[in-house]
Image (tube, rainbow, N blue to C red):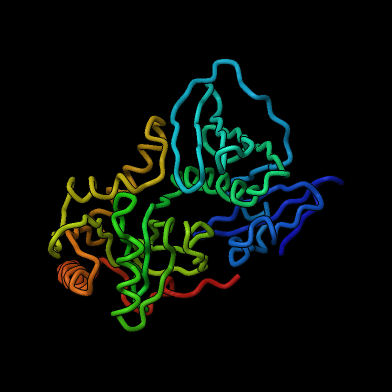
């Protein structure tokens, strides 16, 4: 693991996710391997000389409140309870991993290129809290660079990646597991938070250190073959969507602060490109093999009509990333 001493009491660790390198500054004596086990496949030998997406300094003591602080959002999910507020110059994140847990505090600049965190290292859930704070700053930072973190389950058929989105409880993980069971050669890329990146060679999907309840932390990259939003239904039916309908299907599953015009504009630009570059569809489905069959046939038909847009099998991007 790349380790650079910054001072006598802290050190910085580097990671690369979806081609973006970032740094996490931890107090000396903290074991990054134990604190961030899901990040191990993403350890990087890069450093500040190559340019960093962001740096999170988790060694700071921060005030409990800021003058002019205004609430933005309050949400509860797999990360715990997270509140977001802002001042004129920064965003403030308060994260409580579990009821009764201490609150971990993070202050980030509006462009999310630098953040400071006040971590309670005695919290038994501190590992998850640190990973969640990194997830928050990462998901906003990448928007400035043509990438977006998507709440989805992603599978790889050996040639392309496919993302399944939908409301919580819709069955994204179940649908992925059906692909793994019934489609030979299929593997799981990530089960909760893959990254989609627009690149010169096409639209690419990357694994990340954040995979929800499923421990799937693969440092891999594949061309994106399609994004499908799942809706539970008594039957199985794939409906391809175009233009504004495709855009509208993609938007709900993407990580961005909607009230931040710069970040939201960046997200809209990314989704506009994705929606015309790869198949986007709605799948009314049951949790069975026929749903997989309907989905695959729908995507295949769409891909054939878009031949030449998606990178062919064997693209240099369709490979396991080495670290």
Residue at image point 36% right, 47% down: 254
Image quarter where the N terminus lies is bottom right
Residue ranking furthest to the bottom = 184
Work out whether residue 96 or residue 322 is closer to the camera in this orientation and state it: 96
Work out whether residue 306 or residue 136 is closer to the camera in this orientation and state it: 136
Picture coordinates of residue 162, whole percent (x, y): 32, 66
Picture coordinates of residue 95, whole percent (x, y): 56, 38
Q: In the drawing, does residue 212 fall left or right of residue 269?
A: right
Picture coordinates of residue 293, whole percent (x, y): 19, 74
Residue ranking furthest to the front = 100
Q: In the drawing, does residue 5 fall left or right of residue 297?
A: right
Picture coordinates of residue 253, whole percent (x, y): 34, 48
Q: In the drawing, does residue 97 fall left or right of residue 315?
A: right
Evaluate whether residue 307 shows in this view: no
Evaluate whether residue 184 shows in this view: yes
Residue ranking furthest to the top = 68
Residue ranking furthest to the right = 8
Work out whether residue 234 or residue 196 is closer to the camera in this orientation and state it: 234
Work out whether residue 85 or residue 101 is closer to the camera in this orientation and state it: 101
Q: How many marks?
A: 0
The part of the image, by quadrant, that contains residue 307 is bottom left
Residue at image point 17% right, 70% down: 294
Image quarter where the C terminus lies is bottom right
């Amino acid at each position: 693991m790349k380790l650079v001493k910054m001072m006598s009491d802290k050190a910085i660790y580097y990671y690369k996710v979806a081609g973006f390198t970032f740094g996490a500054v931890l107090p000396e004596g903290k074991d990054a391997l134990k604190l961030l086990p899901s990040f191990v496949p993403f350890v990087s030998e890069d450093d500040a000389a190559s340019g960093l997406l962001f740096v999170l300094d988790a060694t700071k003591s921060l005030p409990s409140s800021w003058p002019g602080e205004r609430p933005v959002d309050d949400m509860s999910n797999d990360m715990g309870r997270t509140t977001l507020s802002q001042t004129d110059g920064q965003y403030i994140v308060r994260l409580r991993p579990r009821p009764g847990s201490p609150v971990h505090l993070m202050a980030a600049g509006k462009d999310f290129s630098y953040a400071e965190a006040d971590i309670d290292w005695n919290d038994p859930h501190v590992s998850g809290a640190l990973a969640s704070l990194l997830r928050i700053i990462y998901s906003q930072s990448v928007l400035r660079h043509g990438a977006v973190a998507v709440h989805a389950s992603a599978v790889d058929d050996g040639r392309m990646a496919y993302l399944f989105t939908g409301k919580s409880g819709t069955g994204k993980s179940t649908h992925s597991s059906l692909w793994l069971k019934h489609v030979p050669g299929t593997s799981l890329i990530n089960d909760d938070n893959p990254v989609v990146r627009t690149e010169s060679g096409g639209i690419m999907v990357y694994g990340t250190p954040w995979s929800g309840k499923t421990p799937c932390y693969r440092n891999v990259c594949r061309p994106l073959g399609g994004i499908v939003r799942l809706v539970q239904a008594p039957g199985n039916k794939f409906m391809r969507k175009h233009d504004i309908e495709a855009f509208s299907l993609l938007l709900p599953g993407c990580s961005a602060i909607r009230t931040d015009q710069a970040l939201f504009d960046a997200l809209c630009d990314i989704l506009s490109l994705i929606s015309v570059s790869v198949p986007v569809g709605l799948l009314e489905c049951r949790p069975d093999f026929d749903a997989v069959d309907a989905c695959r046939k729908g995507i295949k038909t769409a891909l054939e009509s878009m031949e030449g847009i998606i990178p062919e099998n064997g693209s240099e991007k369709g490979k396991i990333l080495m670290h």
